[in-house]
Amino acid sequence: MAITLAGSGNDRVDFGDIASIAGATAITVAVTLRPSAINAATNNRVIHQWASSTFGAFLMQVVDTDEIGFTVRNGSSLYGPKTTALNLTAGNTYRIVARIGGLGGTKTQSIWVNGSAATTTAWFSGSPASVQNSASSVQIGHETAETSDGVDGDYSEAAIWLESVPDWVAEAYGQGYTALVYQKNQLLYAPLENTSRTNDIVGGLMGTLTGGATADHPRIIYPAWPEIILSAAAAASGASGSASITETADSVAGSANIIVISSAAITEAADTVTATGVSSSASVGTAAITETADSVVGAGNIVVIGSAASITESADSVLASDGSIADAIMKIRMRARRTPMQTNN
């Protein structure tokens, strides 16, 4: 579900003053909007922390009849972009991500809509060093401080980050992925599922609803939980599974974590480690194992789950760490991102 807010009724969701926005040198604001009417004559609000000409922090609103503008403020200095060819239309769904970064330095600005970077121009070209401290509430829809109406329509999936999020996040959000795909510096995420569920589920802020009605929620893709299968205990030789590698005096014997095909003895003499007992044709990988000083790196003859494994020696212990762990984690995440789960309507 989503929440329909009507400007004429001063409908809004109010999260109060979020003090941590003050002093930010970068900010990203995302919201999904399905307008039922477009009326720029009153500069209709979308999402903001704003109040009169000098007390605003950030503002997203409709400008130039059917475009989106986004700005931040510090004192009399404002900075931010506006779209030039968006042409908002009643009845269409717009997944909007507005970004500003580098305040106080090399500034950046962009607005993404439905997964693509929109064509923009400068709305304001000031040089604020940071987002100013505003005592106003973060609101979706109507702005109470200046009694400015919001855009009539259905609102959902509101999010704020205190950084300019990467392009892939703006693209993913615009394609229907939850804002939870990127939680670094995430300050707020309010799915706005219906009129009874308006709270922020990241920072725990209460979303106070005035007016509003429950509407159909747009399709949202949430990550699926990855399936984790634990391997069985490994045998001393011919092993495939999980075990440890230990060193006693000058001999090293191990199975699993590295997987040994057949019965391989791994022995150390001086500064050289060689593997015996496994033919090259029986192994998955290439090459022998060599040790230089106190580090051992090898693939093949021992069989690694993943790409490359490093074996490090410290005192009388040898530990194995699979260099493919990071790759595996990323594959799990990508798989999760490709597994859709639609919200209940």
Image: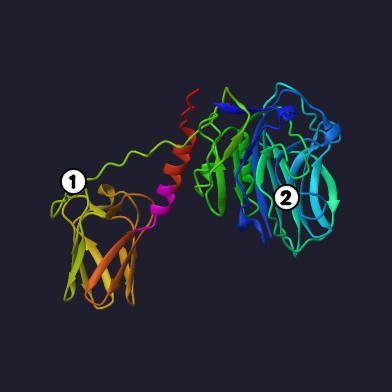
Instruction: Please tell me whether mark 1 sits on a helix, a strand or a loop.
Output: loop
In the figure, is residue 325 to the left or right of 279?
right
Residue 131 lies, with reference to residue 291, above or below; the image says: above
Residue 58's tag is: 2
User: In screen coordinates, is 71 left or right of 41?
Assistant: left
Q: Nearer the viewer, residue 186 or 136?
A: 136
Does residue 328 belong to the magenta stretch? yes
| Image depth: mark 1 or mark 2 in front | 2
Question: Is 323 a magenta residue?
Answer: yes
Crowding at mark 1 (Cα within 10 Å: few <14, some 14-19, many 20+): few
**Kind of residue at badge 2:** Phe
User: In this view of the protein, can residue 266 be seen by the observer?
Assistant: no
Query: What span is colored magenta in the figure?
Result: 322-329
In the rendered image, the residue lying farthest to the left is 236
Q: Position of residue 77 (x, y in %)?
A: 83, 58
Three-letter code for the amino acid on which mark 1 is drawn: Ala
- Image spot of residue 12 (x, y percent): 66, 35
The N terminus: image quadrant: top right
Name the secondary structure under disc 2. Answer: strand
Circle 1 sits on which residue?
232
Q: Residue at x 86, y 32 (%)?
A: 41
- Judge whether 249 appears above or below 134 on screen: below
